[in-house]
Amino acid sequence: MKFKLPILFALFALSISGKTAPQYSVVNIPPPPTKYKNFQIDGLTFLPNGKLVVCLPSGEIFFRDLTKKSWALFAEGLHNPLGVIAISNSELIVAQRPELTRVRDIDGDGHADDFEVITDNFGMSGNYHEFNFTPVRDEDGNYFFALGTGSRGDGVRTITRGQFNQRGRPGRMHSSAPYRGCIMKLTSAGKTIPWSYGHRTPNGLGFDLKGNLFVTDNQGDWVGSSKLFHVQQDNFYGHAASLAWKPGFENSPLQTPVEKLAKMRTRACVVFPHGTMANSPTKVLAITPQANFGPFTGQLLVGEMNRPRIMRIMLEKVGGELQGACVPFIDGSPLGHGCNRMDWAADGSLFVGQTKHTWAGGEGIQQVSWNGKIPFEIQNMELLEKGFKFTFTKPINRELAQNKENWPFSSYFYEYREAYGSPRSDETKVDISSIKISRDSKIVEVELAELKAWHIHEVKIMNLTSQEGDDLTNNYIVYTLNRLLQNTPPEPLQIKTANSSKKS
């Protein structure tokens, strides 16, 4: 059964309302006393001594003593710092637009007095959109950072830093200076290399508890809907421009047939449906054992700029690659818009910094805390041979869960194309064959009439309560089904064709 896409999507989008379980509280943190009165937060972390660190678009870095509830200016004069790592109580690594910088307080007076370039081995054309995002460090001392592409909304300057590459210049978002649109690695030996290619606006790096590196990307040209990628060396993730810098790729990226690009690309492990899940995903943060945040240890959190939302990500390995589901988690007021940077405080609470940079978003700092009581949520969603297994945090009402009408599944995909964004293609209602419930009433196995590889499968679970009568807090969940457990068909191109809405 094919949906009438525009009507269905509009009604469905309107039905997605934000909720946060009552077991989580959100409070505002007073902003730092910046003289520029711009309270957007572009970097956020904690020192070993527990002090909060924030970076502002004005180029300032402030520390906050959470016990004394006081702010102190640590550094200023930086250029659009978009991420920070705390090395010690007096040393930071900061991603500012032209470089990664070591910022230190050597004389111990509480103010930075030493600024050292640790790498500037990448190019800049002067385009406003060439951001340097979210540095992270692995257990071996290697740093990773993400370079945004330039925008056709602004040109390139007469003098550029690094080689100007005309092959990377055409397109809505371009890579005319070295490595724009790449994830970069600064090795512990001091060498800077492009680590992966094909990123558009990768505003959010982070590791899971196993050391896997992930990055988000924003919907736009070559990105049908926003995504989460598992970053692996030398892979190409779809945005064509940065191929101008990939060794062995000699063609003009935009003159390369889309069929060839589609065969080269690595799929996202999670796609965030545009308009209903996320329009502009940000920081990736693992829920650590030290986090005091509910029964979700090991899963990932991802921020969202365009609405007051933090999503929860649950991944599994299928066919040797990671894929999985996303669900709204901390959602709606009093959480603010523009959730851009996140980190864990010493008490296990989550601190969130918000920004907008003239786009959708907000400003400020908020603290999200869990009261220790179990919320009624989907704890996990996993692929089965013929459907999905849902694990809930509390025993569910068996009668309501057995009702097939309460599980309205659909499947679809987004086209791979140069145009900005993509409609949903091959959107189909998926019938339910059977429902099985575990003895403890916490696991529901839903068998579907058809599972489609290389398709997104989503459901908004209706009318489900726990045995205690609690409503399911967040009932909209989306699984990016790339590979089946058995007999996965060859990966389709899913490119734009004359009849693309009818193709799978």
Image (cartoon, helix red, strand yellow):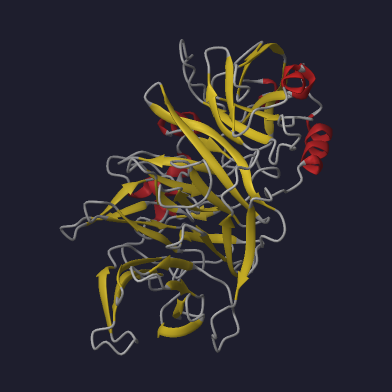
Decide if residue 322 is on the left or right side of residue 195.
right
Q: Nearer the viewer, residue 200 or 228?
A: 228
Q: Nearer the viewer, residue 250 or 329?
A: 329
Q: Nearer the viewer, residue 456 or 409?
A: 409
Q: Is residue 326 above or below residue 117?
A: above
Give residue 157's position: percent from left, percent from top. 45, 71
Quadrant location, the N terminus: top right
Q: Is residue 205 above or below residue 392?
A: below
Q: Nearer the viewer, residue 179 or 403?
A: 403
For the point 57% across and 78% down, the residue is 31
Q: How many marks?
A: 0
Q: Which quarter of the picture shows residue 335?
A: bottom right
Give residue 47's position: percent from left, percent from top. 36, 70
Decide if residue 146 is on the left or right side of residue 220.
left
Quadrant location, the C terminus: top right
Give residue 30's position: percent from left, percent from top. 59, 77
Q: Residue furthest left?
A: 189
For the point 69% across and 51% down, the residue is 22
Give residue 36's position: percent from left, percent from top. 57, 86
For the point 46% across and 11% down, the residue is 486
For the point 31% across and 48% down, the residue is 195
Residue 76 visible in image: no
Q: Is residue 447 above or below residue 27?
A: above
Residue 110 visible in image: yes
Decide if residue 42 is on the left or right side of residue 102.
right
